[in-house]
Image: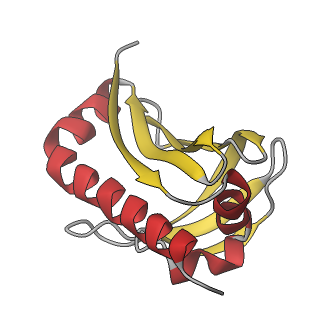
Amino acid sequence: METAKIEKRVGVQASSERLWDLLADLSGWDRWNPVETGLQGAIAFGGQISLTESIPGLPDRPTTVRIGDWQPYAQLIWAEKRGWAFNVIRYFEIEELAPGNCIVSNGFIFSGLRGELFHDKHRKTLRAACEAVAEGLRTAALADD
């Protein structure tokens, strides 16, 4: 099965703990994430999260996703099956280079024929969404609470 990937990586002068705290606080995502909003649920193996996906240029889409994997201070991954020929993996990764200095990645991996077609059709829009999420997370991580 072919896959297509969109990713944005940014450097952040913050600890992996600070970044994870922002990711793990699902109810706080509305403060920094313009794409995934209204999150409800729990980060747990096999857990579910309900959210609204608001990608500029596409209709808002309420959905429920299933946690695929997570590791505190390192990653959060969820998966969504969109019909018989379209799967999406959404991921957030934190790589601590040195204390207080991280690389944060967020992206989409599409698989299945329709997933590849969706990726090809909306590549620029999806890239802009990943950039907006990365900048929102970076700004929130640097803000004083």
Q: Residue at x 47, y 71 (%)?
A: 33
Q: Residue at x 73, y 65 (%)?
A: 21
The part of the image, by quadrant, that contains residue 115 is top left
Q: Name the residue furthest front.
A: 99
Where residue 63 appears, as percent x and y from the top left, is 55, 62
Q: Is residue 41 above or below residue 12?
A: below
Q: Residue at x 49, y 66 (%)?
A: 137
Q: Name the residue furthest bottom.
A: 145
So how many labels did they put on this image? 0
**Picture quarter with the N terminus:** top left
Where residue 85 appears, as percent x and y from the top left, is 41, 29
Where residue 47 appears, as percent x and y from the top left, is 80, 51
Residue 37 visible here: no
Q: Is residue 99 above or below residue 20?
A: above
The part of the image, by quadrant, that contains residue 38 is bottom right
**Picture quarter with the C terminus:** bottom right
In the picture, measured across the screen, residue 125 lies left or right of residue 82, that is: left
In the picture, measured across the screen, residue 124 lies left or right of residue 93, that is: left
Which one is in front, 10 or 134? 10
Where residue 108 appears, as percent x and y from the top left, is 41, 41
Q: Name the residue furthest right.
A: 44
Which one is in front, 1 or 21? 21
Which one is in front, 24 or 87? 24
Residue 73 visible here: yes
Q: Residue at x 63, y 60 (%)?
A: 19
